[in-house]
Image (spheres, coloured by chain):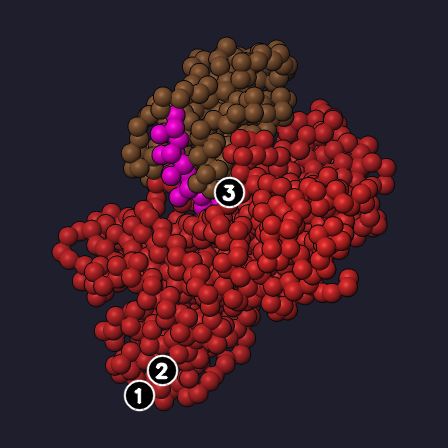
Chain colours: A red, B brown
Amino acid sequence: MPDTPDYSWPAVEKRRVIGKRTSRLDGYAKSSGTAKYSYDIQRPGLLYGAVLTCPHAHARLTSIDAGAAQKSNGVTAVELLAKPGEEIHYAGYEVAAVAATSEDLARDALRKIKVEYEVLPHLVSERDLAKAGSRAKPSGEQVTGDPDQAFKDADAVSEGFYGIPVINHCCLESHGQVIEWKGNQFEYWPSTQNLSGIGGDLAKVLEIPATSVHTHMDVMGGGFGSKFGHDRWGEFGARLSKKSGGRAVKLFLDRSTELQIAGNRPSLFAKIKLGGKKDGTMTVWQSESWATGGVGGGGLPAGQLPYVFRGVPNKRMTHTSVSVNAAEERAWRAPNNPQLSYVTCCAMEDLAAKLNVDPVAFFDKNLDYAGKIPGPEAYRAQLKKAAELAEWARLWHPRGQSGSGSVKRGLGIGFNAWGGLGHPSKCLTTINPDGTVKVELGSQDLGTGTRTVIAMVAAETLGLPVAAVQVRIGDNKYPPSGPSGGSTTVGGVSASTRKSTMNALAKLFEVVAPALGVPADQLEAADSKIQVKGSPSKNLTWKAACRKLGTKSIAEMGENAQRGPGGLIGSGVGGVQIADVSVDTETGIVKMNRVVAVQDCGLVINPKTAESQCFGAVLLSISAALTEERVMDPVTGRILNADMEFYKLTGIGDVGEIIVHLNREPEHDKRGVIGLGEPPVIGGIAAIANAVTNAIGVRPPVVPLTPDKVLAALEGRNA
Amino acid sequence: MSRTKEPEERATSRAGFSRRGFIRGVGLGSGALSAGVLEGEAAAQAPGAKVVGPGAAPVTLKVNGKVHQLSLEPRVTLLDALRDRLGYTGAKKVCDRGVCGACTVMLDGKAVYACNVLAIEAQGREIQTIESLSEGGTFHPVIKAFVDHDAQQCGFCTPGFVMAAKAFLEQNPNPSYEQVKAGLGGNLCRCGTYMGVRKAVLQAAKEMKGAPHA
Ligand code: FES
Ligand code: FES
């Protein structure tokens, strides 16, 4: 390339597409049911897979006999997935799978597989650390400053217990795939957050070249962090298809298995003691925390507390990781952050109540402890805005002083913090002589609006309407993009698309410059024209300009090479959420009146889908705060609610209003594009728990705040 | 939670062999079904149930006005017949037990959970699926409203919501905001699109007035 173009985003006043509310490009396909999810893929002679899982939380498989299943009606292949002698560490572990001509016949066959187990002792609950025994792995104590002295000097000390249990991802499209072999190669339709990488990963375990896998996925039905790998079912699904002569096998987990093994978020429990001064300054933090992320222990690393307010001068912390007999944790939107925010913001509001300080003033005061990015002042501005939108001054009463009626109203606060930047991404832009434009990326749209954002960036750069850009994603024949995790997708794809489209446009300028009689660098693209800068009447229409390409299309790459800062994208955002609830103290029912979410996310490409991300995140928080919990049966070691009747997601009638306020001032915009997947999902649980506590005057220590827990707290039964 | 529309309401059976009906008929929790109790046996014991099968039997289904002849085991749900046999994949299987609404279709003008209706039981009835709302390249006002209000993210729940919204609006042409919140309570979304859905349903109500659409 002769000159490297200046890739930076156009100035705010020059943007015609970026920053405008734009309907998602696949909206009609999704709403009309014509969008094809991998779950909807139909192939000639399609077979259906089904999986048999272990019913015991801890067992040794002693024998497995699939002879009858093999002969069962419609069965084309059987895979044994566990061997005699194998120790199994959680219920739901896959022990066998079959492929058959219908789902019902596949399930019939599963019932004919005889498996015997020697049942072993299990532990499925981490809540009582004393009972965890050798399953608990404490990490050493971390001490900063002089906590003992700080407690002595404190004007008030508050102590509490706070818990947030394991929850499940519960993606509506369950995990799985369709695989169809053609000779030594196969077609692969997964439901994944990692379109470019997943095929190669699966090829590796199948010991075939990565080039032998063609991965496709147009749309996907939810991942939330749980869909990065091909998983065991990718592997045995491929084998079932191969054994069935290559016929396509559709294997998606049934709901129960999905909830047992295909994604859970670790818990966090903590005993926290805080001290502070009359003026509202928190001076000391002490926490003893523990968590489980399944059989591998896990949960968060020690020393992550307090959340956001890390700079408190005196700290003492221990953390214990507990291994339980349940499937391994998976990343869940903003891994560990909602839990950290929950215990931190709740413990801090308890200290504020002890000190008799309004929580807004209290958090404001202690924000000096927040890190540099986004920084105390950014948070203060957000807290102020959130308080204003939540009508804090009018509606907030000191804890427990919500009037004498049986329905009590309360407000509470939660904070969030996240990184951002962009994953590695490559984009190929083609401009054809007939004026058509396509941009290709091996990326995926999880429902976040990625496809639309790519089109908007390309349209902005090329001076075209959004509809004139064909976006091709969801196929591994396109240039690779990274997995969608950690809010890095919008940064990655917007940067690569911007660069690729600018590179392609520079080539077009070179071709048309002679016709317009100016050097290429004097041209610009706007309003579907290529025009001379400063004299827009000297122009060629986009079509006329492209015709000058003769028979040769332009094809140019652009790359977001690394997760480093580069002008187009940024990182380090914060947000504040305030919840407003009414609690019926006779029934224990919590009603969500309103949640206010004030959020920074840098330059906003599409406010319409960005707001949807925030609404969705707030709704997930409400669900986690009020209804969602994976309930383990201590006797059988199985999940009691591996279904959607009792694994309760928030419903459409359960919420009042949600107010989303995106910070879009020049100082936010100039930071570049920053992902929004994680941050708004973090603070809501704390905000709601604090609001309930504010309303009823006592803290129900463990979410979700179901009526029984609220009533127990009111009766002083804080178990 | 505040679901005013109970799952049972969506699974009303006329002919006596709805899936939920025979589960209840033998006094089993619905958990037993997915745990592998033989559906055929359960059906045989349900008082007053017609006995068909267990082998495949001829079944005629009229979907979006088109008649399809099929050979199906009686245990096959309407949802599986639509998706796996007839290629109508707009309705999704998510919970497979009448909780989430992702499989919502209309039977004789009423919203049902297609996972909770047996295909044999849908015979002789008008089955309408989401695919009928964009026939001929025009979109039903509910679909347009869902796009306008971004009432979808991953979109897996969306066709079910659109069908539920259409059925709801046909019964309640002038709903209040609160009625929308209550009336769409039989569908669940994991991505959290409810705010958009509520606004979309109100917009669609306005647009559907005086502009009847199939
Ligand atoms: S799949 Fe039918 S209601 Fe959930
Ligand atoms: S849009 Fe994803 S489940 Fe509703």
Kindly identify the amino acid type of the residue bearing the numbered disc 3.
Ser
- Closer mark to the observer between disc 3 and disc 1: 3
- Residue A187's mark? none
Marks 1,2: beta carbons within 8 A: yes
Q: Earlier in the sequence, mark 1 or mark 2?
A: 1
- Closer mark to the observer between disc 1 and disc 2: 2
For the residues labelled 3 and 2, the Cα–Cα distance comes to 48 Å
**Residue range corresponding to the magenta coloring:** B191-208
- Residue A23's mark? 3
For image coordinates 83% across by 36% down, the residue present is: A182
For image coordinates 58% across by 44% down, the residue present is: A465
Residue A420 visible, this angle: no
Is A164 within the magenta? Answer: no
Label 3 marks a residue whose chain is A
| Quadrant of the rendering where the N terminus of chain B is positioned | top left
Circle 2 residues within 10 Å: few <14, some 14–19, many ≥20: many
For the residues labelled 1 and 2, the Cα–Cα distance comes to 9 Å
Image coordinates of residue B151 in percent, x first then y, are 46, 40
For image coordinates 54% across by 75% down, the residue present is: A139
Instruction: Name the side, left or right, on which A478 lies relative to A88.
Output: right
Kindly identify the amino acid type of the residue bearing the numbered disc 2.
Thr
For image coordinates 30% across by 69% down, the residue present is: A360
Kindly identify the amino acid type of the residue bearing the numbered disc 1.
Asp
- Residue A283's mark? 2
Q: Which residue is mark 1?
A: A153
- Does label 3 point to a residue whose CB lies under 8 Å from ligand 2? no
